[in-house]
Structure formats: C-alpha cells, structure tokens
Amino acid sequence: MTRGGFPFPVDIYYQTDDKLEGVYHRGQNKIWDGKKVLSSALKKYGLPQIDAEKQIAVEALFSIILWGEYAAWNVSSQLSSMLDDYGAKMAAVSQAHDEARHFYVMRDYLQTLGHHPRPLPAPVQYILESVLETPDLARKLLGMQLMIEPVALTIFRFVKKSNVDPVLTELLGYFEIDESRHVALGVKYLPKILKRMSKFEMMNFLLWQARMIRAEIQGLKYMEPYLITLGMDPLEVFEFTEQRQIECLKMVTLEMGLGDSLWAPIVKLIDFQKHLMFRSNPKASFLRRFGNSFISTFLTSYTTEPHS
C-alpha cells in the first residue's frame, strides 16, 4: 500500500522479531543521562590526573573509540531505514540512541584531557568507511555488530581493568552495558540474509570479511604501544577480541541450524594474521615471518617463533 509515493508495508505488519523488539525495550529501560553521569564522576573523582605518557595512550585509543562511536551512530541510523522487520528496526533505533550518547560523552571526557581530534590510522579508517559506505545489509550488520562492536567491548574491558583513570572507568561501565545489547541485532538478523545467499554471493561476502579482518588486525597492531603503556598484553587483548568475534559467528551459524564449517577459513585467517602480527620474530624479514606463520597455521600444530 502506498500513500503519496511512500510505501506502507502492510504485508509485513505482524512480522517482528520479539527478541529484537525486546532489545529496544531493554535499551529504553536502561537509558542514562550522559551529562549527569560524567558530571557526577568528575565531582566524585576530580579532573583526570593521568601520568603524561599514559595520557597520550588514553587519548590515542579513545580518539579511535570516539570516531568509532560516531560511525556506529551513523551505521545504526542507516540500518534502521534498511531493515524491514519491525523488531530489528526498533533495535537499530535503540542502538543509534546509545551511540549518539556514547559519542558526546566520550567527546566531553576527552575535552577534560585537553584533547583535540586527530586523524584515524589508515586501517581503522578503512574499516569504518567500508561499513559506512557499503549498501549491502549483510556486510553492514557483520562489520558493525559482529566485528567492530566486539573490539570496542574488549578495549572497554581492558582499560577498565587497568583503572588508568577512575572517571573513565566509571564511564566505560555504562558503555559496556549498552554495547553488549547491540550484538543481538547481528546475531538474530544476519542469518536470515545469509540463508538467501547464493554460493557466489557467500564467497564475495567471506572475501569482504577477510579484508576487514586483515585491516582490523593491522588496527590492533597500531594500538600495540599504547596498550603496553597502559600495562596490557597486546596478544591477550587480541585473543580476547578474537574469542568474542568467533563466539558471535558461532551464534550466527547456530541460528541458521549449521555447524561452524562456514567460518573455518575465517578462523584460520585470524590465526595466521595473529601469528604474523603478534607471535613472529619482529627482527626477522617479512618473507621469513610470513613463511613461518603460514607453516604454523596451515601445515603444523600451533608453534611459536622465539622472539630472541
């Protein structure tokens, strides 16, 4: 049915995913006032007093998070207009609301440090632009809900654990609660799209995912010195991210009634890139590191190169 050229989808009036509609209602119940929460934390702990070297690391990491939240705000707004299922649309709208709040709260927090916006590292910019610009719904859901969100959640978890600044620690507790809801949209809706894909479409989808994974790992490698400065083990951060992402992918195939074989090549790629970026001897030539990583990943049981 149309009125004035606008389509009213009467035929899908009752098509809604109750679980995704529930994401919206839980989000409504847990809305928090970012201005009040930041003001309260600053009143409780005072302005951030962070060691100069650690402040550089915090600004570098959370400048990336800031623009990640901005991208997520835009992507979730795009999703709300692309999705047909009412429950999924509601979940996307709820996420857009959350991401807008995360953006302004992180912007205001960084301003207390005297931070000025800086350009994104190339691999991170590639990831965010790829998800923002793709017209493909499956890629947008995979990229934002099941790849970018787990990275953000991992960084929140480890920075909270480091407690580099009690104000930031308190804020990230709120961010974590919101972000943990967002994964559901990808897990519940993506399987519906994947089931309709041809083998050729699925191959292109997985190739796109492989390019995204490579850029994502390069982005984590860029963050390595900042993670070390804040007392974190970059490999531990990477492996926690990897675990979260693989868990999300397994939930997708479970929703589809499939085994995990669909993601086997992707899991191998992650393993290879992990070995190449984080386990190989940084003093060795690229060809040697590539060869040793390939052998360790594809030809032998897992081994680790010495770093000496």
Image (cartoon, grey):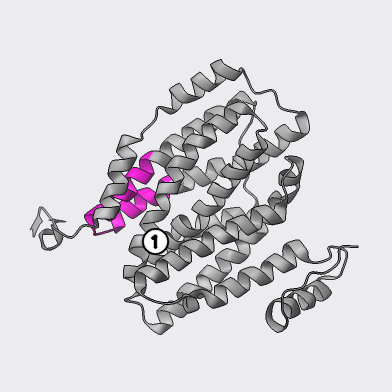
Left or right placement of residue 56 versus residue 102 in this view: right
x 56%, y 52%: residue? 151
Left or right placement of residue 248 versus residue 13 in this view: right
In the rendered image, the quadrant that contains the N terminus is: bottom left
Residue 265 visible in rendering: yes
The percent position of residue 308, horizontal first and vertical second, equals 91, 62
- SS class, disc 1: helix
88 is within the stretch colored magenta? yes
Graded by Cα atoms within 10 Å as few (under 14), some (14 to 19) or many (20 or more), the crowding at tag 1 reads many
Left or right placement of residue 28 versus residue 124 in this view: left
User: Foreground residue, 291 or 64?
Assistant: 291
Instruction: Tell me which amino acid carries mark 1.
Output: Val
User: Foreground residue, 144 or 264?
Assistant: 264
Q: What residue range appears in magenta?
A: 73-97
The percent position of residue 298, horizontal first and vertical second, equals 68, 81
The residue singled out by tag 1 in the image is 187
Residue 136 visible in rendering: no
User: Foreground residue, 60 or 162?
Assistant: 162
